[in-house]
Amino acid sequence: MPNGHLLKGIAAAFLYKNDDDPQAVELQAMFAEQGFEKTLAHYSELNVDSEIVTLAHEAYLALK
């Protein structure tokens, strides 16, 4: 199934910053420490080397 919109949603979540949102703060802290791929793999339980993680990172870079 096409997943382009889901990939954009994942990318947007990594761009979301809100100091009043504990989950956003946690995500941004791990992202700063571990990078995109490891952070997404941790929260999604996907393999860090999977194609979907790579595609999500590409979507993130395109939105950034």
Image: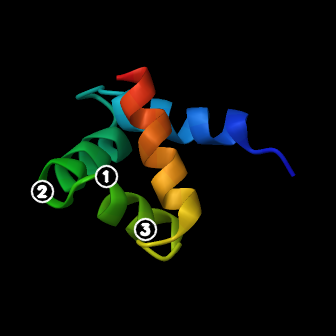
The picture places residue 32, in percent across and down from the top left corner, at 15, 48
Which-is-in-front pick, marks 2 and 1?
Answer: 1
Residue at 58% of width from left, 59% of height from top?
A: 52
User: Label 3 vs label 2: CA separation?
Assistant: 14 Å
The numbered dot on residue 33 is 2
The picture places residue 3, in percent across and down from the top left corner, at 74, 44
Q: Name the residue under label 3.
A: 41
With 6 as the anchor, is 1 left or right in this view? right
Q: Which of marks 1 and 3 is nearer the N terminus?
A: 1
User: Label 1 vs label 3: CA separation?
Assistant: 8 Å
With 45 as the anchor, is 27 left or right in this view? left
The single residue placed furthest to the right in the displayed view is 1
Residue at 49% of width from left, 35% of height from top?
A: 59
Query: Which amino acid is tagged 2?
Result: Glu
Q: Mark 1 points at which residue?
A: 36
Front residue (pair 31, 24)? 31
